[in-house]
Image (spheres, helix red, strand yellow):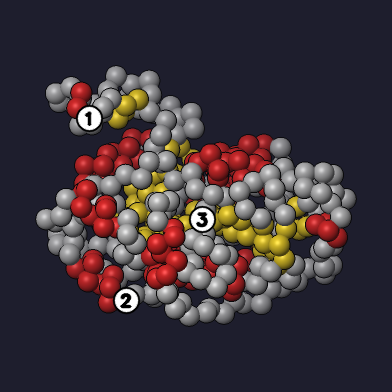
Amino acid sequence: MHPVKHFASLVGLGLGLAAASATPASPDPAAPDLSAVTTCKPGAPCASPLPVRVVIVTMFEIGKDTGDAPGEFQLWKERRKLDMRIAFPHSFHDLYYNPDSQILGVVTGVGTAKSATATMALGLDPRFDLSRAYWLIAGIAGIDPADASIGSAAWARYSVDGDLAHEIDAREIPAGWKSGFFPLDTQGPGDRKPPNPRGELFEVNLALRDWAYGLTKDMTLPDDPGIKAERARYTGYPNAQRPPFVLKGDQLSAMTFWHGKMMNDWANDWVGYWTSRKGEFVTSAMEETGTLQAINYLDRIGKVDKKRVLVLRTGSNFTMPPPGITAADYLLRENEGYSAMNVSVESLYLVGSKVVDELIGRWDRYRDTPPQ
C-alpha cells in the first residue's frame, strides 16, 4: 500500500536514516557511451543505447528526490549515486543512472495504470539496452499480521490482481456469501471452478526468487521502539510480534487501499484461489500486476528478460487492526503516517542492496545466466 493521500504529511517526519555502503561495481571493459542521452531524443532512434545491469523500480517519492523524508526511491538515488538525470517526458518521473554500476532508477507513479505505462515506455525506449537487465521491484506495502511484522521484507513468487472481478455492494450481498467480490466467470464467492487467469496472476522466476531469499534470509533488519510497541498490540499473532525479518510471501496488487480483518481474509482467499493454493498472501500493494504485465509483453519481443525479475516488498503498516480496534479507526490513524514508514524504506534498501551488490559485483557470472 502506498501513502497516496498523505505524502506531504510524511515529509517532516525526520527519518535520520544512516547511510549504507555499497559494494563497488565491476565495470565492463568498455565504458557506456553517455552520448546516448545527450544526443538521442526520447523515443527517437539511438545508435548507442546505454547498457543497464539492474533496474530499480520504485513507485513513489514523498517530496524531493534527495534531502528530505524518503519514500521508496530516495535512498537508492543517494546511496547508489544515481546522479545522471535522464529526461523521461513520456512517463511519470525522470530516470536516474549511474554509468559506473549501470544501475537505472525508475519511479513509476502509484497504481497499475502508471506502473504499466512507465515500464512499457522504458522497455521501448531506444536509449537503453535492457536485454540483460535484472529488475528489482522494490516498494513498501501493507503486511498480513498472520505472516510477518511491520518492517519485515517479503520476496514474492506470485503477484495477484485484486481489481479484475465481479462486485456487489456489501449492503446487497446474498445470505451465505462471504463477500460481494468474486472472480470473473464464476457464480459467486463460493464457486471454486479451476482458475483461468487472464491477467489476474503473474509468477516470477522461482529459482531467482529463492536465490535472492537465500542470500538475504539471515539479515538482521532495522527495528525501533515505536514499531516494537505497535507489534506488541497484536496479541494472538506471533509472527506480527517478531522483530522484522526476511521471508517468502506473495503479493496482492489492487488499486483500492483496503484495510480490515474481513478484507484481509478476502485477500488470503483471493491469492489462494488464483494460485491454486500454492501462494500465500503476505503483502498488499498497488502496482505489480501492471509492471509485470508490461515486462511480459516486452519479453515477447526480446526487449527484456522476464526471468530476471524480482519483487520485494517491506511492511510499512499492517493490513488489519490489532484486537480491540476497529478497521476504520486504525486505517484513519495510519493515514496520518505509517507505523513503520521509517524502518520499511530502510529495510527495503538494505535487503534489495544485498542482491544488487551480488549481481553487480559478479557481473561476469550473472550477465548471461541468471543465478539459481
- Are the residues at dot 1 and dot 2 in contact (C-beta closer than 8 Å)? no
Q: Nearer the viewer, residue 262 or 87?
A: 87
Q: Amino acid at mark 1?
A: Ala
Question: Is 328 on the left-hand or right-hand side of 302?
Answer: left
The quadrant of the rendering that contains the C terminus is bottom right
Label 3 neighbour load within 10 Å: few <14, some 14-19, many 20+ = many
Q: Is residue 127 left or right of residue 271?
A: right
Specify the quadrant of the image occupied by residue 16: bottom left
Percent x, y of residue 119: 62, 45
Residue type, numbered disc 3: Phe
Which label was assigned to residue 60?
A: 3
Query: Of the residues shown, which amino acid type is indicated by label 2?
Result: Asp
- Mark 1 or mark 2: whose residue is earlier in sequence: 1
Q: Is residue 365 visible?
A: no
Residue at horizontal 40 percent and vertical 62 percent from the top: 9
Q: Which residue is mark 1?
A: 170
Left or right: residue 175 versus residue 83 is left
**Quarter of image, res 276:** top left
